[in-house]
Image (cartoon, rainbow, N blue to C red):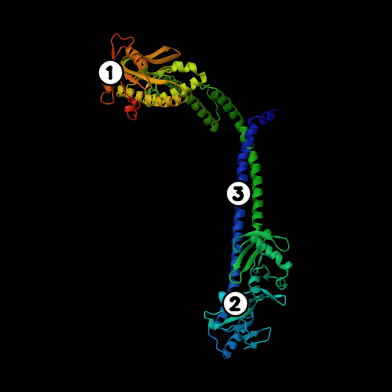
Amino acid sequence: MIVRERFRGLFQKYLLVLFMAVAIPLVVNGVVEAWFGYRDQRERLDQLLGVQATSAAAEIHDFIFDITNQLGWFVQVPWSDEPDERRRTEALRLLRQAPAIVGLALIDHKGLERLYVSRIGLNRIESRTDRSADPAVVGARSAQVWFSDVSYHRGSEPHLTVAVVGNRPSVGAVVAEVNLKLIWDVISAIKVGKSGFAFVLDRPGRLIAHPDISLVLRGAEEATSKPFRNIRDAIGPAGAGFATSRDAEGREIAAVAAPVAGPDWTVIVEQPLSEAYAPIYAALWRTATLLAAGTIFAALLAYALAHRMTEPIRILEEGTEKIGAGSFDHRISIETGDEFQRLANSFNRMAAELELAQQHQERIAKLKRFLAPQVADLVDRAGDDSVLDGRHAEVVVLFCDLRGFTAFSAALAPEQVMNVLSEYYACLGRAITEFAATLISFSGDGLMVLVNAPVPVEEPALRAVDLAVEMQKSVQGLIADWRSRGYQVGFGIGLASGAATVGRIGYADRFDYTAIGSVVNLAARLCASAADREILIDAEVAERVRGKRPLERLGDRQIKGFDEAIPVFGISFDAVADIKPQGSGVIR
């Protein structure tokens, strides 16, 4: 019963995970090693076959061009009309020195045959037969050295016609018939492994050299040449690299081709795949054996570790659930003396840190409800909120609201009104945050902002004026868009500077930071008097920014709640350049 419970819980999961953690790397490593072994063996096979094919092609090339070099001696001296016994002697000597040459014809500069000697036919001297139109002569005159396609003497032995002309027309040409059976010596000497060999095909794909000479002597039989031509076609262009195909007996083979320059032949070296990949198969069997042993070990190890981990994991699971539910005062107790105990201690430290972080977040949230983010962070870093206590301070109070908003909101659907207000407050909020001012309250379309409290700043009047200019510019951009949609609203701002009582006010569960005093009333009245695009300031603010910002005296105005007329000044935000805050909450 206990085992069944384990296999329905963490035991089963960790058994599987730990098994896979050990078994999968073993399997992956085995597969990777097998793949790289396979690739390395292919590269070695490609190099081996390629070297053999290139070497054979070079030897055949040397064989052919050794003959052309010897023929070249016959086209060094110009012809005369008299018989040339010396050339006949040299021709007979060449037949003795080069067994592969079975016939030799010397053509003079007029294209007439002057001498023909042969091993298998009658010699001709000064026959003067016109051979100027002979394909061999024509081909040699255009390319200096000319090779014919392979022909089969008596339908059996492969022969090649080679023609050479000299550098001057007066020396004529020499045409030789070459028996290609002697290439068998080169091909039969190539051995790759136990059963690999080489063969040669001409340009049309006929077999002209093979270790089994009987196949060559069958001549141009299609049935004989076709399997070898299929191998060449599978390889592609000579020198393209290693390819696989099937030989005449249907066995899979690996093959590489190399070109023989001049006669345009192809040397192909092949080896059965079963022999070529024998080292890979042996390595795969070894890898499979190691994998089987490794997976058995992994299963045993996974079972032991999963059994040991079950109880500590259960305790950790219960503890994390409680911590995840917000019980940061919960502590996990594990006394195993190993990593589980250290993990439990880490969880306990994390819970304590989360408890502190939660307290910190709650503190910051309360501060940011009525302070600018920069000021709230400053108060939190200082660890002292005494700046929020009630006190007297010189402050600048800013009020702003929309003109015509009441009529505007009555004519639109609630959703449209809320969308407009969302854009409006987002715009003003960016400006307030940028200038490190303190948002005191907002109601409907109006805002109250405080500068120089709770944290003093440098030149509060200048900062408040610049904030008002930035707010007016930003909101006017919105108003232009609203008017294009038919919304007729405006925006006005009022500022006043003076002494006020500032501090927290409220009850245990809710506090607000605010300012109380006549300066607050004055700023509110100035805002109410401001028309669209206007920024109205009192005399004290005007005095402190005089000479720093363009002012316009608007005369004395009777403000509600004040016995005497108040001098009022205005600032045109159009006349002020782009303003940047002079600092961000700088403490004096």
Secondary structure at numbered mark 3? helix
Q: Within the image, what quadrant is residue 129 found in?
A: bottom right
| Nearest to the observer: residue 242 or residue 524 | 524
| Nearest to the observer: residue 492 or residue 377 | 492
- Residue type beneath disc 2: Val
Label 1 neighbour load within 10 Å: few <14, some 14-19, many 20+: some
The answer to which of marks 2 and 3 sits earlier in the sequence is: 3
Residue 540's tag is 1
Residue position marked by numbered label 2 in the rendering: 138
Q: Is residue 210 visible?
A: no
| Nearest to the observer: residue 193 or residue 150 | 150
Q: Quadrant of the N terminus?
A: top right
Residue 32's tag is 3
Secondary structure at numbered mark 1? helix
- Residue type beneath disc 3: Val
Disc 1 to disc 3, how far (Cα)? 82 Å
Disc 2 to disc 3, how far (Cα)? 60 Å
